[in-house]
Image (cartoon, rainbow, N blue to C red):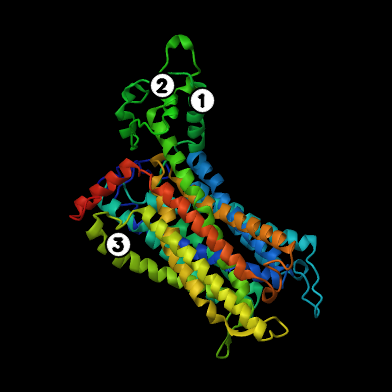
Amino acid sequence: MENGDGEYAQDGSVDLRGNPVLRSKRGGWTACTFIVVYELFERLAYYGIASNLVMYMTRNLHQGTVEASNNVTNWSGTVFLTPLIGAVVADAYLGRYWTFVAGSAIYLMGMILLTLSVTVPALKPPPCDGTTCPRASALQLGVYFGGLYTIALGHGGTKPNISTIGADQFDDFDAVEKLQKLSFFNWWMFTIFVGILFSSTVLVYLQDNVSWSVGYGVPTLGLLASVVVFLAGTPLYRHKKPNGSPLTSIGKVVAAAVWKHSVKLPVDGKQLHELELEHYTSRKRFRMDATNSMRFLNKAAANVNAEKRLPPWTLCTVTQVEETKQIAKLMPLLVTMVVPCTLFAQAGTLFVKQGATLDRRLGGFLVPPASLGAVVVLAMLICLALYDRVFVPAARRRTRNPRGITLLQRIGAGLLLQAVTMAVTSVIESRRLRFARSHAPDAHGVVPLTIFVLLPQFLLMGASDALLLVGQMEFFYDQAPESMKSLGTALSLTAYGAGNILSSAVLSLVVRVTGKTGTPWVTNNLNASHLDYYYALLAVLAAANLSVFLALSGSYTYRAESRETIGVAMDVQGELVA
């Protein structure tokens, strides 16, 4: 137990040895500074690879547009699916800190391998000789994609835990820290976007104009620096003890309810099995009352006569049942997050290839196609700052909600704007195609039309993501049960993984179907394609998804203790109570 002045953290936070910690010595924004700086450099490293990946695959690995786009989205999908593994390992075995450290080591190994693959001559395909572009060998592809998927594996250990470690630095039982936590995710994303901004400008320029070795070497060093910074802050961190695998608890509840399907439920929910309140308060956890939603699952907590001799595992607590219900309630909404992530994937693939067909000159400077991703980031940064500093205070006075508007309202606004974005993108691409057909492209397929005609679609994508991405991350973290926060974060990231994989599936299906009746909508030559039709299809898909989201969100009930604790924080500050 730590010695010193001040109160101990009331939320069960401990040091790495499992001892209670003083609030004055650990946690808060002081500890978060190290975590936020880590995220800045780590995002610089990740997007230093991801931002220009489609261009490396087409120019250096000599892959076609559809093949390269699908390879990028398949890898991105894996990157965002592996956090499910990391979340289970963290919650059940190693804890968030040590899972993160192990993931960082694997991540760094992948970055080193990837840097070697673009540096060592034997590991790089030879350049094109005129119109002849030799395919990469099995060894070259194996090393390059081996590095990429090693990064994906390491990402599974770091991504679901780093933001949760940051949120853990604020005590939910302290009103002041609880209020500070409300802005944490906004500023967390702000820092991420600063790292992305540097990657999509400086690093992309180095890759296009200096060398890929330098362009990959810098983010590798950035990742190394980020890990060093994180480890330096270790004495200041608060930690949470592993509570066991949330998936095991969920599976136990479902299995118990099925096993006892014939058991009659008592009229009074208080007759269901539950532990004493002291059991939860001593562990700094919330006890949950029985509800009538998904009533079938309540059978897992039903007491039965001793003579029936049911296995001991079939008796669950009401809290376990209600936690399972809370995760189950999130699943339909999670499904509606997949399509938005599919649309977001276009900014790093087809949007970049669009830019490569346009005049990139800006004075005497050639704008790298992937650098337009910086416009998305700038729009996000500006919108996040305006949202947090202007919109939220104004809306709070009107709605008496400490967040200004609910998380689902924020996500819904982002979904609407994203559908508009894809419609605008389709119109812009239609204009580009008309220009390409009336003005002959040069030998490289470049149309004499400035690349900056694409700015509206990048700006709108950034504005929609400022509402959607932050709202999505915060929603799944906030609404997950207290003992399943890492799982909640992992679920949010899973939508990105599924969205990227869906992007590959939709693109492949569209190319195959449209190719049966003529030229596919998307080919290696975008000037002979109908990318505008493809974007219009995505706009329709976005609108349909928005309709489903609105129907589901209208009947969603927020987690009770979440609203109550936030309300207490606002009251202590003399502000408004939710």
Residue furthest top in the image = 307
* Element type where label 1 sits in the image: helix
Residue 52 in view, yes or no: no
Mark pair 2, 1: CA separation: 12 Å
First reached walking from the N terminus: tag 3 or tag 1? 1
Quadrant location, the N terminus? top left
| Image marks 3 and 1: residues in contact by CB distance under 8 Å | no
Location of residue 480 by image quarter: top left
First reached walking from the N terminus: tag 3 or tag 2? 2
| Image marks 3 and 2: residues in contact by CB distance under 8 Å | no
Task: Give percent across and percent down for residue 425.
Answer: 54, 71
Give amino acid for label 3: Val
Mark pair 3, 2: CA separation: 44 Å
Give amino acid for label 1: Val
In the image, 386 versus 88, the foreground residue is: 386
Task: Give percent across and percent down for residue 330.
Answer: 45, 44
Residue 509 in view, yes or no: yes
Pointer 2 residue = 302
Task: Give percent across and percent down for residue 184.
Answer: 36, 57
Q: 371 above or below 320? A: below
Task: Give percent across and percent down for residue 81.
Answer: 57, 50
Pointer 3 residue = 392
In the image, 104 versus 550, the foreground residue is: 550
Q: Which mark is residue 111?
A: none
Location of residue 288 by image quarter: top left
In the image, 507 versus 63, the foreground residue is: 507
Q: Write the residue at 79% across / 60% down.
A: 138
Q: Is residue 306 left or right of residue 55?
A: left
Badge 2: few (under 14), some or many (20 or more) residues near its Cα, within 10 Å? Answer: many
Q: Write the residue at 53% across / 53% down.
A: 338
Pointer 1 residue = 258
